[in-house]
Amino acid sequence: MTDHTKGSFFGRRVGKPLRKGRQEQFDTALQRLQPDLSVPAPEDVATLFARPVSSVWMEVGFGGGEHLLHEARRLPDVGFIGVEPFVSSLAKAVAEVDSDGLENVRVYGDDAIKLLDWLPPACLDGVYQLYPDPWPKRRHWKRRFINPVNLDRYARVLKPGALLRFASDIDTYVDWTLRHLRDHPAFEWTAERADDWRRPWAPWSGTRYERKAVREGRVGRYLEFRRL
């Protein structure tokens, strides 16, 4: 049986080194924006934010941050926790959060499982996982983030009725996700019509990975599951 409790679910973490000035800005802003996992998590995760928020969502693997930042600007009364281990992408988002003064965003620059295990139970109103690395080779499937153990993690931190939203342009990963969520007792698929999984949620800002998929002739699929 594959051990889903160890090992990373992402590839390299560092690309080109940041310029000195940008590195200093990044280090300072990240210290303010990143939750401190060395101390116990607050009972109310809304207190992680610098402004009052009515609900809290997480985006796991936010890439360039297009969706995360769009939603944070559109919904200033909702708190967003973005997770991205790739430093260049993280630094880009952190710079925008810092320069725009977005008080409803927190970021975490390491493995999402560490953050999920730190958070208190039933604290999130929703999770996004958009165009994750599909790890298409069979020998790498153990690295796919959607697996029984991580679905247990999601189930623990999501409130009853909360939503788990997943998007991918890779049919094998879409099938994989449907199968794993179908088999998990804590989730139900919200689709009511055959077209539901072909259309993104409204409003939808998109991501750069989605745009790349469209340019290359692939079609995105959009799955939504409810925490029972």
Image: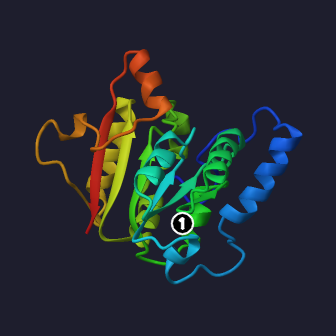
At 17% from the left and 48% from the top, the residue drawn is 191
At 76% from the left and 50% from the top, the residue drawn is 26
Residue placed most toward the observer, 46 or 198: 46
Q: Is residue 87 left or right of residue 72?
A: right
What residue is shown with label 1? 116
Residue 1, image x, y percentages: 50, 54
- Residue extending furthest toward the front: 100
**Colour theme:** rainbow
Give the SS element for disc 1.
helix
At 61% from the left and 43% from the top, the residue drawn is 10
- Residue extending furthest toward the top: 216
Residue 147, image x, y percentages: 44, 53
Residue placed most toward the observer, 85 or 100: 100
Count residues near mark 1 (Cα–Cα under 10 Å), then give few for <14, some for 14-19, many for 20+.
some
Q: Is residue 51 left or right of residue 226?
A: right
Is 213 located above or below residue 35 in the figure? above
At 24% from the left and 36% from the top, the residue drawn is 199
Residue 222, image x, y percentages: 30, 40
> Which part of the image, by quadrant, shows the C terminus?
bottom left
Residue placed most toward the observer, 99 or 158: 99
Q: Is residue 14 left or right of residue 11?
A: right
Residue 108, image x, y percentages: 63, 58
Residue placed most toward the observer, 117 or 23: 23
Name the residue type under label 1: Leu
Q: Is residue 83 visible?
A: yes
How many numbered marks, from 0 up? Answer: 1
- Residue extending furthest toward the right: 20
Q: Is residue 146 visible?
A: no
Q: Is residue 191 left or right of residue 18?
A: left
